Image (spheres, rainbow, N blue to C red):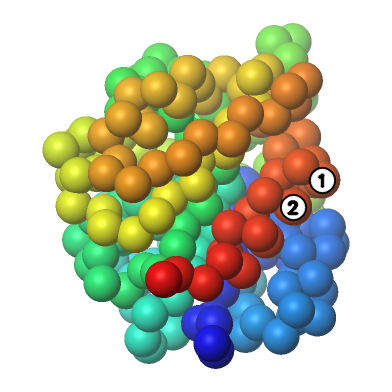
């Protein structure tokens, strides 16, 4: 059986290279004979970085246009996972298998105040004292990052996804979440997806997830599994 291409979608304030390339994901999938597509999201990496919030309002549609033709497998982390779930709910026939990591209750019951604080942390000149906000500040404190674009992103894209949309996803979905990740709990998300399985990473927080070997092994096994 010839397996389809694999799409890798990174999280907020990072890039395809930092999330997937530098951590070996792309090399491992390529060595396994998979065709890999790892686009940078709008506002990130090598993609255009508009400063207008309206440019990010239809990000799901933008991502769908970056995907290869035909059925595919996909792995997403954090924001990338949220976007893949949205695309898969609108275009379920495009996906054979899906892995979503670093998401849970946070994308169903959003926290506007948290997003506001993240935007402030991204825009700040100095790191905030709050460790969680300092993490986002550090992500944005890189030469290739456009802070103004990231703030516009947060203002323009609606992170919450209506739980009823998740019922339209038809492919098997692996939900991966660290037990130290504040994005959880994952129960409501898993229950809303018709064919979902949960993998909990013990002792792992949000930031450590992409480089966690258990996540890497589970995700590669999931997308490497042929369907009956």
> According to the image, label 1 marks what residue?
213
- Whether tag 2 and tag 1 are in contact, CB under 8 A, the answer is yes
Pointer 2: residues within 10 angstroms few (<14), some, or many (20+)?
A: few
Q: Quadrant of residue 158?
A: top left
Disc 1 element = helix
Q: Residue at x 50, y 21 (%)?
A: 184
Q: Residue at x 45, y 63 (%)?
A: 97
> According to the image, label 2 marks what residue?
217
**Which quarter of the rendering shows the N terminus?**
bottom right
Q: Tell which residue pokes out farthest to the top in this image.
A: 129
In screen coordinates, is 137 left or right of 154?
A: right
Q: Residue at x 46, y 58 (%)?
A: 98
Q: In x, y percent, where is residue 2?
A: 55, 89
Q: Quadrant of residue 154?
A: top left
In screen coordinates, is 223 left or right of 115?
A: right
In this rendering, is residue 183 above or below 72? above
**From where the camera sits, is residue 197 visible?**
yes
Pointer 1: residues within 10 angstroms few (<14), some, or many (20+)?
A: few
């Amino acid at each position: 059986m010839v397996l389809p291409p694999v799409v890798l979608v990174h999280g907020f304030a990072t890039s395809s290279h930092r999330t997937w390339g530098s951590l070996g994901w792309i090399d491992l999938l390529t060595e396994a004979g998979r065709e890999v597509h790892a686009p940078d999201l709008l506002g990130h990496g090598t993609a255009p970085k508009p400063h207008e919030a309206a440019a990010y309002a239809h990000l799901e549609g933008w991502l769908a246009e970056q995907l290869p033709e035909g059925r595919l497998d996909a792995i997403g982390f954090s924001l990338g996972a949220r976007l893949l779930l949205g695309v898969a709910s609108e275009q379920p026939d495009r996906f054979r298998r899906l892995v979503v990591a670093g998401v849970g209750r946070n994308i169903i019951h959003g926290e506007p105040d948290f997003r506001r604080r993240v935007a402030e942390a991204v825009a700040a000149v100095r790191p905030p004292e709050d460790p969680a906000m300092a993490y986002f500040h550090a992500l944005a404190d890189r030469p290739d990052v456009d802070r103004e674009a990231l703030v516009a992103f947060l203002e323009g894209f609606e992170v919450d996804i209506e739980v009823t949309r998740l019922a339209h996803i038809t492919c098997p979905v692996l939900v991966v979440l660290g037990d130290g990740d504040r994005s959880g709990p994952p129960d409501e998300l898993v229950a809303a997806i018709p064919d979902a399985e949960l993998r909990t990473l013990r002792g792992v927080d949000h930031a450590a997830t992409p480089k966690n070997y258990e996540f890497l092994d589970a995700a590669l096994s999931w997308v490497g599994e042929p369907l009956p």
